[in-house]
Amino acid sequence: MDALAGLLDGPRARGAFLLRMVMEPPWSVRIEDRAPLCLMCVSEGEAWIVPEGDAAPVLLRPGDIAIARGPEPYTVADAPGTAPHARIGPGGTCHTLRGEPLEESMRLGVRTWGNAPDGRHTLLVGTYQEMRGEVSRRLLDALPPLLHLSAGAWNCPVMPVLEEEIGRDEPGQSVVLDRVLDLLLIAVLRDWFARPDAAAPAWYRAMADPVVGAALRLMQNDPAHPWTVASLAAKAGVSRAGLARRFTELVGEPPMTHLTGWRLALAADLLRETDATVEAVARQVGYSGSFALSAAFKRVRGISPQEHRMRERRTHDHRTPEH
C-alpha cells in the first residue's frame, strides 16, 4: 500500500449527494450542510467560492476543481459580492434565506438544479455527506479548508464520465456515482499532494525517502506483524539507530509511536464497522490479545475499546433517522 492508498483507504462515498448546478447570473448559494468534503468543478462559465472568515475568494473557471472541507460554511456565487438567495442545509436540502423550500421550484431534471435551464454557469458538485472513522480523519486533517487546482494543473479522465453519468436515472446509478466520485477525489488528491507547495502531512512526504518510506510501507501493509525498530531497520537496509533518527526527523515521531497510532486507528474503525470481538480486532492489527489492545487504547485514547464501540454506535444511531 502506498501513501495515497493508505490515506484514502477509509473514506468511500456511500449515497453521496451529486448534482449539476445550472445558473444564470446573478446567483449566490450559501452552503451550510456541514458536509466533511465537497468537490466542485466548473464545466461552463465560472463560479466564485467565498470561504467563511478572512480567506480570499477563489475563482473557478472551466476545468478547474475545488475541494471544500467542512463543516465551516461557505458561499458559491457568480461574483464575490453577490448576496445569497438560497441556503443548502444538511442532506442537500435547499431553502430561501427565509426558510421557504426551493427543491421543487429549482429542479431542472435528474440531479440537475438551478435558476435557468440554459444558464451560462454550470457546476458539477459531489458531496461526501459523512466520513466516519479514524482513517478518514487522517485524510481530513491533511487537507486545507479549501483546495483548488486550475485546469492546467491537473488532468483527470474521470470528469467527463461524471458529467455523463450525473444526469442518468438507471438502476444502481447511485452506486456508480459514488465510485466515480471516489475516483475523482483520488485523482485530485494525487495531483495536489504532488505539488511542492502542498501542505502534505509529514508521514506522506516521508514516503519519498528510500529508507523511511520503506519502513512506513511495511507498517501500513502488514500492521499485524510484530514489528520492532530493529526488524524494520533490517528490512530497510540500515542500522537501528539510523532508522530511528531519520524516521523521527522526517515523520515527527519515533517509528513505534507512529505504528501504535496507525494500529489504533485501524482498530477504532474495525470496532465501529464490524462485530468482531476485541480479541479478534487486537490480533488483526498487531496486538497479542484483547488485554494488550485495551491497555494501548486506554493509554492513548483514554477509553477502552468497548467504550469506543458503544460511543460510536450511539452516535450513529442518533444520526441515522436524519438520513
Image (spheres, rainbow, N blue to C red):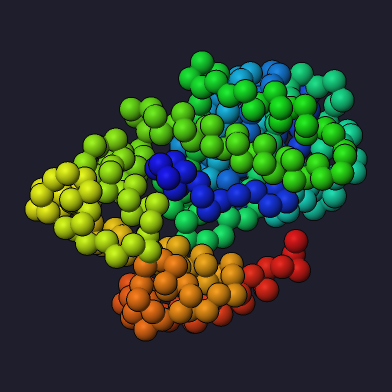
User: Quick check: 280 above or below 70?
Assistant: below
Q: Residue 310 or 117: which is nearer the viewer?
A: 310
Left or right: 122 in relation to 275: right
Residue at point 67%, 41% (across, down)? 179
Is residue 279 left or right of 65 when viewed as pictured?
A: left
Tell me where residue 39 sits by quadrant: top right
Q: Is residue 321 above or below residue 111?
A: below
Q: Position of residue 249 (x, y in %)?
A: 17, 47
Quadrant the N terminus occupies:
top left
| Quadrant into which the C terminus falls | bottom right
Would you say residue 30 is visible in this rendering? no
Q: Nearer the viewer, residue 3 or 95?
A: 3
Quadrant in the picture for residue 44:
top right
Q: Position of residue 192 (x, y in %)?
A: 45, 31
Q: Is residue 105 visible?
A: yes
When asked about the image quadrant of residue 265, the answer is bottom left
Residue 167 % position (x, y): 83, 32
Could you say where residue 276 lies in the image, as x and y percent from the top left? Answer: 55, 75
Residue found 52% across the figure and 79% down from its top: 277
Out of 89 and 244, give the one closest to the viewer.
Answer: 244
Task: Give the side of residue 31 with respect to residue 234, left or right.
Answer: right
Position of 304 relative to 171 (above/below): below
Q: Residue at x 41, y 66 (%)?
A: 285
Residue 9 horizontal side relative to residue 226, left or right: right
